[in-house]
Image (spheres, rainbow, N blue to C red):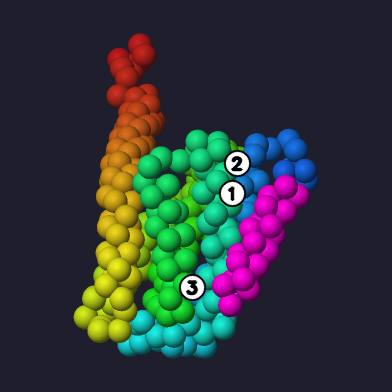
Amino acid sequence: MALALCLQVLCSLGGWLSLYISLCRLTKHRSYEWSCRLVTFTHGVLSIGLSAYIGFIDGPWPFTHPGSPNTPLQVHVLCLTLGYFIFDLGWCIYFQSEGALMLAHHTLSILGIIMALVLGESGTEVNAVLFGSEITNPLLQMRWFLRETGHYHSFTGDVVDFLFVALFTGVRIGVGARLLYCEMVSPKPKWFVKVGGVAMYAVSWCFMVSIWRFAWRKSIKKYHAWRSRRSEEWQRKCNGHVKTHSPRLAPDNGLG
């Protein structure tokens, strides 16, 4: 069983690495980060779909059955995701592209998935955490691509930012709190699984603080820009009004 799991993880790692190398060759005019983020976007979309199917259709429901034995589909998805996180963590360390918080997130994710695979249980809630963690990932990558291509400061960029902040707050913080509560009050999960859940939720809150600060700064900037435009429009309107009526206010030009 352990050998089969290792083979699945190695195949997953090889697959993500092969995809990255292929993208690097196909987009030679782009940076290595461009190709890596394409891999990240692909994993995000794939993991969202698979984890949503497991949680909402295949089961079991993570809010009522935490600590349940892993299903075969859960094992496959966790192995697929573990291979990706190993690839991405290695890439981040090699290129030194991320800070300590992101590295901590990846490390906790890897340890949590390994723990669920070794125990043969708690794949239900780990899969739910995967869904909550990845649901904002495609938006984050879209934001980066928009910035790289010069289209970030647009209506599309504003929509992506709004959806990202809303989903992160509602799902990772709001729904995540409910999931953590169910995990803590259930007698089935191991104590160290619960500790891992608390650690992942704490990391989400660290991200949340940074995101709210960003959202506040952007909102203030947008508000000041709107005030400035309103002021300019009002001034143009007033100036146009004065210019339009100025001939009538002039003297009779020698007629009187």
Residue at 33% across, 51% down = 207
Q: Which of these two is toward me, 60 or 67? A: 67
Amino acid, disc 1: Arg
The picture quadrant where one finds residue 68 is bottom left
Residue at 67% across, 52% down = 17
Q: What SS does tag 1 mark?
A: helix
Characterize the magenta stretch by its predominant secondary structure.
helix
Q: What SS does tag 2 mark?
A: helix
- For label 3, count other residues whose C-alpha is less than 10 Å away and answer few (under 14), some (14-19) or many (20+): many
- How far from the left and from the top, in percent, is residue 88? 55, 50
Residue at 30% across, 24% down = 249
Q: Which mark is residue 69?
A: none
- Image position of 119 with respect to 13: above or below: below
Q: Nearer the viewer, mark 2 or mark 3?
A: 3
Amino acid, disc 3: Leu
Which residue is under mark 1?
Answer: 37
- For label 1, count other residues whose C-alpha is less than 10 Å away and answer few (under 14), some (14-19) or many (20+): some
Could you tell me if the residues under marks 2 and 1 are in contact, i.e. CB atoms within 8 Å? yes
Provide the residue span drawn in magenta. 1-23
Residue 121 visible somewhere in the drawing: yes
Q: Is residue 6 magenta?
A: yes
Q: Which mark is residue 117?
A: 3
Q: Is residue 216 magenta?
A: no
Which residue is under mark 2?
Answer: 33
- How far from the left and from the top, in percent, is residue 70? 48, 82
- How far from the left and from the top, in percent, is residue 208? 30, 54
- Per the model, the C-alpha gap separating discs 1 and 3 is 27 Å
Residue 136 visible somewhere in the drawing: no
- Image position of 53 with respect to 5: above or below: below
The picture quadrant where one finds residue 15 is bottom right
Amino acid, disc 2: Glu
The picture quadrant where one finds residue 246 is top left
